[in-house]
Image: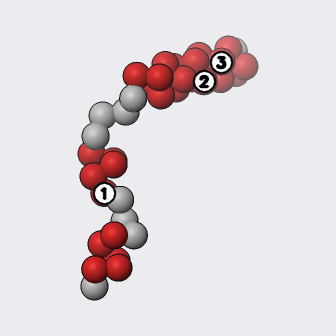
Amino acid sequence: MQAATTANPVPRKVTRPRADALRNRERIVTAAREMFV
């Protein structure tokens, strides 16, 4: 039973995304929006 709990890193998803990850996502969304326009 313990192997199943250690294989699923749930606490990582609960934490707030890093600032650089948020900036990267913004840049990706902006670039994608420009491609579709």
The relative height of residue 6 versus residue 22 in the rendered view (above or below) is: below
Q: Which mark is residue 28?
A: 2
**Callout 3–callout 2 Cβ contact below 8 Å:** yes
Q: Label 3 crowding class (10 Å Cα cut-off): few <14, some 14-19, many 20+?
A: few
Residue where numbered disc 1 is placed: 10
Tag 3 secondary structure: helix
**Callout 1–callout 2 Cβ contact below 8 Å:** no
Look at label 2 and name its amino acid: Ile
Quarter of the image containing the N terminus? bottom left
First reached walking from the N terminus: tag 1 or tag 2: 1
CA distance for labels 1 and 2 = 26 Å
Q: Position of residue 15 (x, y in %)?
A: 28, 40
Is 28 situated left or right of 25 in this image?
A: right
Q: Label 2 crowding class (10 Å Cα cut-off): few <14, some 14-19, many 20+?
A: few
Extreme-bottom residue of the structure: 1
Q: Which mark is residue 31?
A: 3
CA distance for labels 3 and 2 = 5 Å
Is 29 situated left or right of 18 in this image?
A: right
Q: Which residue is found at the position 37% from the left and 65% from the top?
A: 8
Quadrant location of residue 28?
A: top right
The relative height of residue 7 versus residue 32 in the rendered view (above or below) is: below
Is 14 situated left or right of 24 in this image?
A: left
